[in-house]
């Protein structure tokens, strides 16, 4: 039995929509926003009235997908479709799109995607690469020290760079991003008196509430395992992804595609 709509106040409906919206991470919501822009731009150019955009018919979504294919990367189109579906869910609208049909269109879009939308495969980060850029960094300078600590910490702990750096300075949130008190150095009373660096990541895609610890132990060998100090991660000057990439690019003597970029995924130690 359904509750009459007359008994649900407008503020209740807005509250429901806001709660549903929080089921997607902020970065996902930002990506979905761009997907909706593509969809509404397509509808505007085709003269599709707003009342026909939601709930969207299968024919409209198929036309949007077919027209967009060949102009954008398949991931862009896939995110756009996901954003339209999320938009429907948030507004509690029916979603009538057949999954198999959309998979076929997305597969075709992958084939038709322009070459310019595909990035060349990047070389994995290696110890040799880290050693090559080290002489070009001034570890007495806070920025270079933070970049080096981020690169080596991500390398040895197999962490994601997006978990150690922030997208924008203004986006820094101590409840979500690494800061000074998240870095701990521990010396174990084993036969080697091993020094271990532990970095607590407050917010991850896997655990958005309890966070996760990444760690690595100092060993004899190359200076790539130098442990970062707590002052490297500060709430007043967080390391921004673009700063990280730009600094490594300038320090790199190799013209090859830069490993360890914020979008390159987990680095691969040899």
Image (spheres, helix red, strand yellow):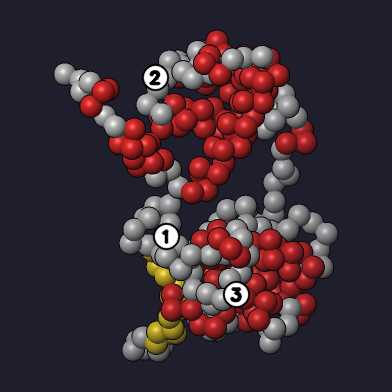
For mark 2, what is the residue? 94
Residue 72, by quadrant, is: top right
SS of the residue under disc 2:
loop
| Label annotation for residue 17 | none
Q: Earlier in the sequence, mark 2 or mark 1?
A: 2
**Residue 242 falls left or right of residue 12:** right
Q: Earlier in the sequence, mark 2 or mark 3?
A: 2
- Number of residues whose C-alpha sits closer than 10 Å to that of mark 3, classed few (under 14), some (14–19) or many (20 or more): some
Percent x, y of residue 44:
67, 20
For mark 1, what is the residue? 203
Q: Residue furthest left?
A: 1
Distance between the alpha carbons at the discs numbered 2 and 3: 45 Å
- Image point (58%, 23%), residue name: 106
Distance between the alpha carbons at the discs numbered 2 and 1: 32 Å
Q: Is residue 161 visible?
A: no
Percent x, y of residue 189:
33, 89
- Number of residues whose C-alpha sits closer than 10 Å to that of mark 2, classed few (under 14), some (14–19) or many (20 or more): few
- Image point (60%, 58%), residue name: 167
In the image shown, does 132 or 11 lie closer to the viewer?
A: 11
> Which one is in front in this view, the residue at disc 2 or the one at disc 1?
2
Distance between the alpha carbons at the discs numbered 3 and 1: 19 Å
In the image shown, does 187 or 220 lie closer to the viewer?
A: 187
Q: Is residue 48 above or below residue 138?
A: above
Q: Is residue 81 above or below residue 55?
A: below
Task: Locate the C terminus and report the quarter of the image it occupies.
Answer: bottom right
**Residue 112 falls left or right of residue 13:** right
For mark 3, what is the residue? 237
Q: Earlier in the sequence, mark 3 or mark 1?
A: 1
């Amino acid at each position: 039995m359904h509750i009459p709509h007359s008994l649900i106040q407008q503020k209740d409906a807005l509250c429901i929509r806001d709660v549903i919206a929080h089921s997607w991470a902020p970065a996902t919501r930002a990506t979905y926003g761009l997907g909706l822009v593509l969809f509404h731009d397509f509808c505007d150019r085709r003269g599709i009235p707003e009342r026909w955009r939601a709930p969207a018919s299968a024919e409209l979504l198929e036309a949007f997908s077919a027209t967009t294919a060949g102009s954008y990367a398949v991931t862009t189109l896939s995110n756009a479709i996901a954003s339209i579906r999320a938009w429907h869910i948030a507004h509690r609208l029916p979603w009538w799109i057949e999954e198999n049909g959309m998979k076929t269109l997305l597969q075709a879009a992958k084939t038709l995607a322009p070459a310019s939308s595909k990035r060349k495969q990047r070389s994995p980060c290696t110890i040799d690469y880290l050693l090559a850029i080290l002489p070009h960094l001034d570890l007495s300078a806070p920025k270079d020290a933070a970049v080096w600590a981020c690169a080596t910490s991500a390398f040895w702990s197999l962490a994601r760079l997006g978990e150690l750096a922030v997208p924008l300075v203004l986006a820094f949130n101590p409840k979500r991003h690494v800061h000074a008190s998240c870095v701990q150095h521990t010396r174990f009373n084993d036969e080697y008196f091993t020094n271990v660096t532990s970095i607590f990541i407050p917010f991850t895609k896997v655990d958005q509430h309890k966070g996760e610890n990444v760690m690595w132990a100092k060993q004899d060998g190359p200076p790539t395992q130098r442990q970062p100090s707590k002052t490297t991660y500060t709430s007043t000057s967080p390391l921004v992804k673009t700063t990280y990439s730009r600094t490594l690019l300038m320090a790199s003597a190799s013209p090859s595609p830069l490993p360890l970029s914020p979008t390159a995924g987990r680095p691969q130690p040899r």
